[in-house]
Amino acid sequence: MATEILMPALSPTMEEGTLAKWLVKEGDVVKSGQIIAEIETDKATMEFEAVDEGKIGRILIAEGTAGVKVNTPIAVLLEEGDAADAAPAPAKAAAPAAAAPVAAPAAAAVPAPAAPVAAGGARVFASPLARRIAAEKGLDLTKVQGSGPHGRIVKADVEGAKPVAAAPAVAAAAPAPAAAPAASMPTGMGAETVMKMYADRAYEEVTLDGMRRTIAARLTEAKQTIPHFYLRRDVKLDNLMAFREQLNKQLEARGVKLSVNDFIIKASALALQAVPNANAVWAGDRILRIKPSDVAVAVAIDGGLFTPVLKDAHQKSLSTLSAEMKDLATRAKTKKLAPHEYQGGSFAISNLGMFGIDNFDAVINPPHGSILAVGAGVKKPVVLKDGSLGVATVMSMTLSVDHRVIDGALGAQFLQAIVDNLENPMAMLA
């Protein structure tokens, strides 16, 4: 029986991807667990494994095709004895409208049974063959434990399973409201309108890739739906700079060189523990207060950015945080991060000080409750404790806060805790 291989969801937020490369061709025999393709998400290129064994009867989506929706058939797998002509021909893609800013939804003419949904709305991942066998046997796939990659239900899981009475689908009669895809473009002036405005000017048209589409959609959503407010503080860095120089001399033999950003990460992680109510995220109709300090740090790459997450940052030494951050940043720039390395966290840091930016306001990355924008440390005249004038290295920081999660006084306490840690850096080692 011919079964369809579907575009996988390689992360919880993935809506579509690019079929970067096929590692098999039509007629090849594949085994379960064999890597058959490379899929590009908006953030990374990941390997895709075959779930069932059989022969590749037909490839439906050519390599290099972008914007392939999750669960779209990309190839056909034939079982032993199936004729090659049993595989359906590739569907001809309709020509997209020239001025359409949002891609049209993919056609839903898929003969395999629809993917079941578990309680709470989570989709159950199962191979097309497993779903077909389950439908024939009357199995409820939400009751089956998958043994395939990432818990996916495969043929072997359903062959020996016995039918279990499925709970009645109360809401099945009413169609669920369609959620806006994560990578859909924000509304605004259409492409044709803008291009007409610049018809008499020379320009280069740049096609948006998945990362840029996702950044545009998520940050537009953030500014439109998150009630931002901003708290600003100056930090005197002289004690930190002297302490950093002393530590770096001691760590030189180990090849460790701490950056100011390493101290900011540590200071923020400890502040999240000191003010635990600020260590929170917005979850639609509730707030989740996170126990560990998982700090995301924005890393600029060509064409976009990543926010890799340093987990349990409050428990790690400065040298460990420095090494981990360097590794994550290096792999981010080559798009080699796995989804679990850049998803999560409750708080983020965006540091533009190395570019000479004095201060700025960062946009919160949902579902985070806040983000810290860090400017450059510059020499400024200050009033010293004895009332005299002096010169100090001062750094401006702005905390962007989601008012649904953190109120003004709580945000002020959190920012104060960060400042205290940075101005008294030795206490961070206690």
Image: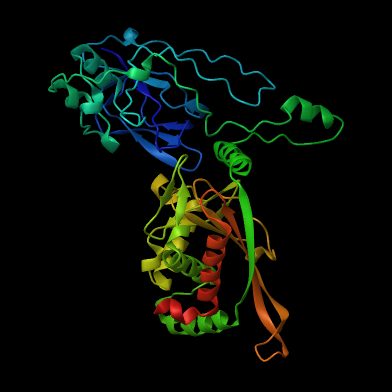
Q: Quadrant of residue 252?
A: bottom left
Between 59 and 93, which is closer to the camera in this rendering?
93
Q: Position of residue 174 (x, y in %)?
A: 42, 16
Above or below, 409 relative to 303: below
Residue 170 showing in the rendered view: yes
Query: Residue 38: x, y in percent?
Result: 41, 35
- Residue plotted at (39% across, 47% down): 340
Residue appearing at x 37%, y 19% in the figure: 171
Q: In this picture, is 150 found above or below 114?
A: below
| Quarter placement of the N terminus | top left
Q: Is residue 112 above or below residue 242?
A: above
Image-based side of 195 in relation to 409, left or right: right
Residue 134 drawn above or below residue 256: above
Residue at the image position 24 percent from the left and 24 percent from the top: 141
Near-viewer residue (287 or 313):
287
x%, y% of residue 372? Answer: 57, 60
Q: If the image is split into quadrants, where does the C terminus sit? A: bottom left
Q: Residue at x 65, y 26 (%)?
A: 101
Q: Is residue 365 left or right of residue 164?
A: right
The one of 129 and 29 positioned closer to us in this rendering: 129
